[in-house]
């Protein structure tokens, strides 16, 4: 055992780590809490260095994590932390509520205290650790003025506690009466009087209240939400918050401020669970600008640094027309790419791409940020790290386009899509179905990122909510290659694939198409030029650029959106898969050296032709997202990011989209989305503008409602 006695000249980090999976009955057991504690312990032991020393962590798991053991951990261990030290309390387990003594009713309108559920909390003679007791313990720790950090991967929801879903870190309410005399501060008249004379106005979104002193609290969710568990790719269970908390630290060198760390965690968690929003609170807001654990985690070296000349005629970088090329003696696997990213102290900047070049990886850096300086070097440097991305494909390149049947199901708040691309089996499924919906993706992503909406979009029937999927007997998907294949060719291929499974002209079934972005153009060509109007009974288009895109090159659009996603510029945070799809698609465009998808330009021959297409005489419904972002909280920050990514010509397009006043979904102007001639029978139905952007039609409540309204008016 390593001694915990303070040493002169050493700054200490004390970590009390508590994780409880195996609770005594009747409390449901969890699976990922001990894993969370093991992971954070490993991270701290591997990262704490320099003038900092990690004192042997006090680790309490399962039956070790009794109420008294946790209290002792504060009083006999964390209270050793001095003015130059950090005291960290990390709890992973059930949160809960218990009946509050009458003396606290003025603080708790619902007459319930929020709690941490210790291993023996619900046994006779014991109680949960109430939030007021946690506050009292933190007051004791704060007496020597250390920096105190509290991280809670648990929840304290006051609703729905009778039927708590499996894998949710919330115990049922403790309905036993609890006397004020049972609280650990019962004999401390000063603290007790402070509570009895305070008001509930100090409560934060977590439902917890921090005492005075320098404290920072990171919590898994708001007080009305559930903290959920998450299964890693290797099958290991973790707390969703804990997993993405460490992911953010590991991927960003651990040098993020608390504010940026919280933004990253929120984006990653919401990519998996829309109804879990991590929280960050502090007694001094200025503390949130500091890096996590201050300088206890030193910077790790990246792969290399680039020197920077300060001579007047050589300042700055211009790599767009003459990219800096690096060759690495290693090859990527099929479908893999490298995304070089730099963090310049304010932004994460995508710099270019790494793709296979024979048996080597060729990394082209098309942009470089200004160098950063530090006290450790006389010159400046640019630090670059590389993220390996793997694109998932339904099949090999020669198999595309693919028409598949999709089974979509939702379990534990996760959407699972199972594809069947065997044409004979799909044909049999079509034969036995009467009402069919077909999903077609856009320029970015694939059907896996949108088809889950058939389960998530809800219809109200006789006062009950039902998934959109219940309207249909069969769900089909069409995945296609759009870098080197024209829109017209994909439209023809769609006709061939449908015909091959029994959906030819004048079939006796009902076929609806849900098409995103470019998928709407593929659908229109099929319907209006390839006799698809004899096959399709309804087309719903979401964010389709019916009069072209304002972007000069598709890579510019993808990289701009990727830059926004990496830095959480949109007010609506994008799911993690959306950002990953953006990155992968951007690299595909660069690998293909295709500047363009010239067909997407408003003056292209394609749009001239489609504007003069005959009336297909089938219903079209148009959904347009209005997320122009003119109300950005930090417009100057946005402009700084764009200036670092693009030339003035591209920035003019971006500036017009964001600040020009003409409504758009951040990729396409609404006027273009709605640009389908009204001189048709029936006239296209344009739904009211939807509060989502180009990448969130299928993941936001507003977008899902619009889709349900379009298919079930």
Image (cartoon, rainbow, N blue to C red):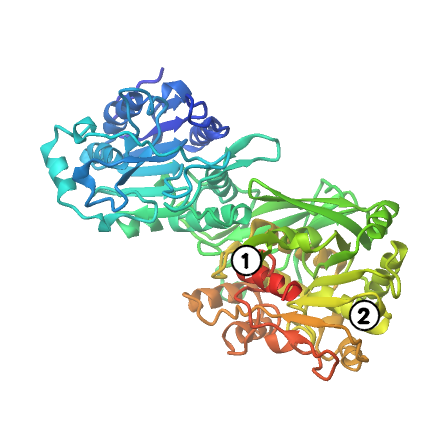
**Residue 584 visible (yes or no):** no
Q: Which mark is residue 700?
A: 1
Q: Is residue 85 above or below residue 478?
A: above
Q: Nearer the viewer, residue 390 or 352?
A: 390
- Where residue 430 appears, x then y in whole percent? 83, 52
- Do the CB atoms of the residues marked 1 and 2 lie less than 8 Å apart? no
Q: CA distance from mark 1 to mark 2?
A: 29 Å
What residue appears at the point 22 percent right and 48 percent down from the top-left corner?
A: 200
In the image, farthest residue toward the bottom: 679
Q: Residue furthest top?
A: 1
Task: Check disc 1 and report its element: helix, strand or loop.
Answer: loop
Q: Residues within 10 Å of mark 1 (few under 14, many from 20)?
A: many
478 horizontally vs 469: left or right: right
Q: Which mark is residue 473?
A: none
Q: Which residue is mark 2?
A: 527
67, 490: nearer the viewer: 67
In the rendered image, the vertical position of residue 435 relative to residue 176, given as above or below: below
Q: Is residue 216 left or right of residue 166?
A: left
Residue 169 is drawn in which quadrant? top left
Q: Quadrant of residue 162?
A: top left
Task: Tell me: 138 left or right of 388.
Answer: left
18 and 622: which one is in front? 622
Looking at the image, can residue 400 be seen? yes
């Amino acid at each position: 055992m390593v001694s915990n006695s303070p040493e002169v000249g050493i700054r200490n980090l004390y970590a009390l780590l508590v994780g409880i999976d195996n609770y005594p009955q009747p409390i449901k057991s969890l699976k990922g809490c001990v894993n969370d504690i093991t992971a954070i312990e490993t991270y701290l032991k591997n990262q704490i260095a320099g003038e900092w020393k990690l004192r042997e962590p006090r680790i309490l798991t399962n039956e070790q994590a009794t109420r008294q053991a946790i209290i002792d951990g504060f009083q006999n261990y964390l209270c050793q932390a001095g003015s130059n030290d950090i005291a960290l309390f990390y709890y992973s387990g059930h949160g809960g509520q218990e009946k509050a003594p009458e003396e606290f009713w003025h603080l708790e309108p619902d007459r319930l205290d929020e709690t941490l559920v210790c291993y023996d909390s619900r046994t006779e003679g014991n109680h949960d650790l109430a939030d007021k007791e946690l506050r009292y313990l933190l007051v004791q720790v704060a007496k020597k003025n250390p920096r105190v950090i509290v991280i809670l991967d648990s929840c304290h929801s006051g609703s729905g506690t009778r039927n708590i879903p499996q894998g949710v870190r919330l115990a049922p309410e403790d309905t036993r009466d609890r006397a004020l005399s049972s609280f650990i501060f019962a004999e401390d008249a000063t603290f007790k009087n402070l509570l009895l004379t305070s008001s509930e106005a100090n409560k934060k979104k977590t439902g917890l209240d921090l005492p005075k002193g320098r404290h920072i609290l990171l919590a898994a969710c708001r007080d009305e939400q559930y903290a959920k568990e998450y299964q890693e790719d290797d099958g290991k269970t973790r707390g969703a918050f804990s997993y993405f908390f460490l992911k953010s630290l590991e991927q960003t060198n651990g040098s993020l401020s608390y504010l940026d760390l919280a933004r990253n965690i929120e984006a990653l968690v919401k990519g998996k669970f829309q109804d879990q929003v991590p929280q960050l609170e502090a007694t001094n807001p200025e503390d949130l600008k500091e890096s996590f654990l201050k300088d206890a985690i030193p910077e790790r070296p990246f792969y290399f640094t680039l020197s920077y000349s300060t001579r007047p005629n050589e300042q700055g970088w211009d790599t767009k027309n003459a990219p800096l090329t690096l060759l690495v003696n290693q090859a990527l696997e099929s479908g893999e790419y490298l995304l070089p990213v730099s963090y310049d102290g304010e932004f994460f900047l995508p710099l270019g791409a790494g793709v296979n070049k024979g048996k080597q990886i060729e990394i082209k850096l098309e942009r470089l940020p200004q160098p950063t300086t530090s006290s450790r070097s006389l010159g400046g440097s640019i630090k670059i790290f590389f993220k390996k991305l793997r694109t998932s494909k339904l099949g090999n390149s020669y198999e595309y386009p693919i028409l598949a049947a999709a089974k979509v199901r939702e379990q534990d708040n996760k959407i699972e899509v199972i594809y069947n691309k065997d044409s004979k089996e799909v044909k049999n499924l079509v034969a036995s179905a009467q009402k069919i919906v077909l999903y077609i993706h856009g320029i970015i992503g694939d059907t896996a990122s949108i088809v889950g909406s058939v389960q998530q979009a809800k219809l109200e029937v006789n006062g009950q909510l039902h998934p959109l999927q219940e309207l249909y007997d069969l769900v089909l998907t069409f995945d296609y290659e759009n870098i080197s294949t024209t829109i017209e060719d994909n439209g023809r291929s769609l006709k061939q694939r449908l015909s091959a499974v029994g959906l030819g002209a004048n079939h006796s079934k009902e076929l609806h198409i849900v098409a995103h972005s470019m998928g709407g153009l593929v659908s229109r060509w099929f319907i209006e030029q390839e006799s698809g109007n004899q096959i399709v009974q309804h087309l719903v288009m979401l964010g389709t650029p019916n009069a072209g895109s304002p972007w000069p090159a598709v890579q510019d659009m993808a990289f701009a959106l990727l830059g926004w996603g990496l830095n959480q510029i949109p007010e609506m945070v994008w799911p993690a898969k959306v950002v990953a799809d953006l990155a992968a698609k951007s690299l595909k465009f660069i690998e293909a050296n295709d500047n363009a998808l010239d067909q997407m330009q408003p003056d292209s021959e394609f749009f001239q032709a489609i504007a003069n297409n005959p009336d297909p005489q089938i219903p079209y419904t148009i959904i347009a997202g209005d997320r122009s972002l003119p109300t950005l909280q930090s417009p100057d920050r946005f402009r700084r990011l764009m200036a670092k990514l693009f030339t003035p010509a591209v920035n003019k397009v971006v500036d017009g989209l964001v600040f020009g006043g003409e409504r758009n979904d951040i990729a396409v102007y609404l006027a273009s989305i709605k640009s389908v001639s009204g001189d048709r029978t029936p006239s296209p139905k344009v739904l009211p503008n939807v509060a989502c952007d180009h990448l969130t039609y299928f993941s936001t409540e507003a977008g899902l409602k619009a889709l349900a309204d379009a298919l079930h008016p």
